[in-house]
Image (cartoon, grey):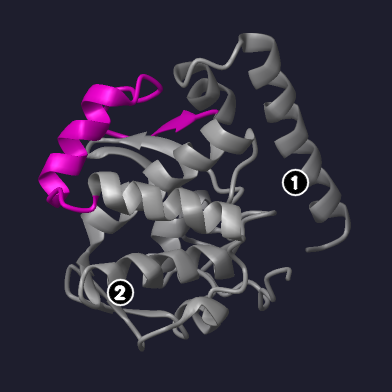
Amino acid sequence: MRDEVPERQYDPNFPSYLAPLVGFRSRKAAQLCAFFALKSQGVIEKLKLIKLIYFSERRVLAEHHRPMLFDELFSLPHGPICSSTLNGIDGAIHGQIWDDFVARNGNNIVAMKKFDRNDFDEVSDEELDAVEKIWDELGHMTASQLRNYSHKYCAEYTETTGRIPIAYREVLEALGVPEDEAEIVERDIASVRREESALGL
């Protein structure tokens, strides 16, 4: 099921990275955030959540050579992130979608209710399996531990005091995918974005 994304709801004076991204699976990202909040007794720290989302996207890339979220990836001071997912968590984009799944309470993200598998209809079984593995492997870590882990083990990450883009190709190469295969995946992602842009999705 394709995301039903409402008309753009952002201030044109905001930085460009707050504009909704063509191809971004906003509803799926919101569902994954609710999933991780529920795994953490219904409430999860924002930094921990955004790290788990990044590692989930990385796991799906490793296993299927295709992203889950078609997000933009960046190196930030606290590690790599999925940028539009963070904007959704912060309420900067697609509020009508995100408000159905999570709410922000200070620095914590709260699941709106006790969702079941049917509520996560945007997430395939393969993707959910990858996300479950990430929780099993990393869910016990604190936000700070995940931050440090991402700095140490994500070779695609660049230490920075600002924002540096991370290409999906760089993630794949860091995961050991040959350069020519990584380039093909990068081109495929760009092709999906062009097609959805042309269709106005």
Depicted 198 relative to depicted 38: above or below:
above
Q: Note whether residue 161 is visible.
A: no
Residue 145 coordinates in the image, percent (x, y) = 12, 41
Kind of residue sitting beneath label 2: Leu
At 78% across and 63% down in the image, what residue appears?
Answer: 201
Residue 141 falls left or right of residue 14:
left
User: Residue 123, located in which quarter of the rendered image?
Assistant: bottom right
Residue 125 falls left or right of residue 164:
right
Residue that numbered label 1 is attached to: 193
Q: Is residue 162 magenta?
A: yes
At 69% across and 54% down in the image, what residue appears?
Answer: 23
Kind of residue sitting beneath label 1: Arg
Residue 48 coordinates in the image, percent (x, y) = 23, 54
Checking the image for residue 38, the label placed there is 2
Who comes first in sequence, dot 2 or dot 1? 2
Look at the image and tell me in which quarter the N terminus lies. Answer: bottom right
Q: Find the magenta span and give its range.
A: 139-167
Residue 83 coordinates in the image, percent (x, y) = 45, 49
